[in-house]
Amino acid sequence: MALIGKIRSNQKILIVFIGLAMVLFVVDPQTLFGGGSREEQPIGEIFGEQIMDSDWKYDNRVEVASYNYRGQKQQYGQDPILTEQESEQIKNQVWSQMILDTLYGVELEKLGLAVSPGELNESLLYGMKPATFLQSQFSYGTMNPQTGQEENKVFVRDSLIKRLNLLINGSNLENKQQLKSLEDQLTKERIREKYIGMVKYGLTGTTEDANRNYAETGTSASVSYIYKGFSSVPDSVINITEEELKAYYDEHRAEKKWKQEVEMRSFNYVTFDVLPSNRDMNAAIARLAKDKGSFQTSQNDSMFVTNNSYSYNNGTSNISQVLPSGPYEGGDYPIETDKQILSASQGDVVGPFTNGQEVLMVKIRETGTREEATAKNIFFSTNGMENNVKLKKRKTLDSLFRIIKLDTSKFSELASIYSDDVVSKYNSAKHDWFPKGKIHANTKFESFCFEKPIGSFEIVETENGLHIVQLLGRETREFQLIAICDTKVTASKATSDSIYDAIGSPLYYGIKENGYESAIEEAGLTSMEAKNVRIDYPQMGTLPKSMSILKWAFNSEIGATMEAELIEGNTKYVVAYLTEAIHEGDPEFESVKSMMKPELLKEKKAEYISNELAGSKSLEDAATKIGETLAQAELTLSMNSFPAVPDNNPSVIGEVFALNKDELSGIIVGDNGVYLAVVESRTVAVKSEDISINKGIVTEDLRSKIDNRLIQALYNVAEAKDWRMKRTIINPK
């Protein structure tokens, strides 16, 4: 109750507890009962008080959410086993929901925000515009055979109504639970929308804000300047001693940005592949060969590949990919295999054969003929353009048409310069053989290619733009529809162990005996770095998140070496070397010096450039001394940076506007370089009697930022701290 009391007393919550943009798992905490006898450990902190699992039942909530998600995967024919990424996503969603529900439960009752049964039924469930996530779930489109994704989705309200009626009229417990969960989720989302609306539309720009906006946008200056980036000064010309770095640390250590909020580690690492051996590939070929006869005689190819394809059963593919909807055109497999497929008859099975780390069988499920054409094309897109722009494009195209008509050899050259069509632009203006319906289906382009005589040369207008088209050929060609049964082969344990013995173990002991750099050089491997890996939301360079690596990193001393560890589904080994440990709290010199060094380097580079510019009488003189070009810029006081300069620092703009007209500035230091500037002319905004427009601009700007700011404000006000990873990683029980 102490926690709840603290929350009740904090009125700031009234403006912050809505807006987490996450998929919310609806779990009734009253239905969850913790079991087990493991030692109690805090999983976080909120309002200065520890969050205990026994109070929040975090682990139970994660278990329920994971169970629900596994069921969803299984329902869609996917492997129900959760990936590490999916598990992590579920945990983070549950955690966010816990924080949100804690604040909701107290404050919404105070405010009296609620959703009536009538509002729920009419506006959210049965209304013409139901909740957004419901519209998404019941939207359908056409399948793109190239991507395997639905496109041009449209919300089908009747499908939603049928599903709702099924849940409402269903007599079993599962239907009732699903309906209750749906209503709870809709209610929570609706209340959140109401509160966001209250906060958002309660924000209004003040007269002072409007005057400031008017002054900032209306005050401008024409500026001549030179800019020299820090990156143009080689690090090698700057010497930083340990004493200088320590002095910088002493001067800046108290600054908030150096305070260590979380534990961090840095380590170097190398990876090497674990590829299947010839024995592994041959074993996979033998396994697939046993099913070749069944595949050939199968009356349901879809069912066969569903039950036997590795890619489908493991959720990395779908039926549209293992049963391609379009004809097979070759090029996916080795040349000799392609020849066999393209010459095979209906019902034949080619394979098993290897393709990279896959073993496949391909069945010819249908053969036939189709009309195909080939043409040259220059395309000008006019989609969404104004009529005057379209007219200019047409005049240009007419000119190109006349040139090509006089000399057809110019077709390819002009296409590479002018065509908006990627295929023709980089393929000598040519579209290779294509069937009806594949390119510009049901348009004048297709009519031209499949109805006009060979050699026809015209300007063709379609709904998307203008074409110069020359028909090169048209003929009837054979095609094949195929079914693919594939198995992705991974290394066996014997193969993995042999790679460990050959590379992993010698590398580990080589690092311990001869040092990291020497050992990896001898092994011919490339070192990578995982810099400042956080304990709360760890990102480990190019490595996937691995609990075993994290436990090693956060429980080892600097200089420790991690033995070869399997990652990425046992397809790679990683060996790591711990280089840095940054501890929570006030910064220690050794912990932050690597982060402070770049800042000190910038300061010394600014000093270096300043010395180069010493004695400059003008911008022209200064530009000559440092080898930079004099530039011009039109600035307003509202800008954060100079145009075309890779530097974002509003204070630089402020210093420029503080200059008198024609005054040569001193060195102005930005985040990424230094400036020297002269204000050539200046326009100062005249105070306006009518600032209503600026007031509206300020108001809209405030409101547009509220969603993201509410999310952050939630954690700031609640002072929520996440210790979930800490309890798992550091000296886990």
Image (cartoon, rainbow, N blue to C red):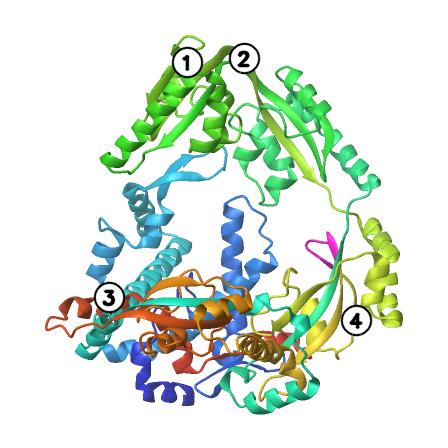
Q: CA distance from mark 4 to mark 2?
A: 62 Å
Which of pointers 4 and 3 indicates the residue nearer the eye? 3
Q: Nearer the viewer, residue 182 or 17?
A: 17
Label 2 crowding class (10 Å Cα cut-off): few <14, some 14-19, many 20+? Answer: few
Residue 450 numbered tag: 1
Q: CA distance from mark 1 to mark 4?
A: 67 Å
The residue drawn where x is 37% and y is 75% is 656
Look at the numbered disc 1 and give the secondary structure of its residue. helix
> Which of the marked residues, 4 or 2, is nearer the chain's N terminus?
2
Amino acid at the residue labelled 4: Thr
Question: Badge 2 is on which residue?
Answer: 477
Question: Badge 3 is on which residue?
Answer: 700
Look at the numbered disc 3 and give the secondary structure of its residue. helix
Which quadrant holds the N terminus?
bottom left
Q: In the current view of this chain or complex, which residue is farthest to the top?
A: 453
Label 4 crowding class (10 Å Cα cut-off): few <14, some 14-19, many 20+? Answer: many
Tell me if 531 is positioned left or right of 10 in this view: right
Residue 9, compared with residue 656, is above or below; it is below
**What range is drawn magenta here?**
566-573
> Which of the marked residues, 2 or 3, is nearer the chain's N terminus?
2
Which of pointers 2 and 1 indicates the residue nearer the eye? 1
Asked if labels 2 and 4 touch by Cβ distance under 8 angstroms, the answer is no
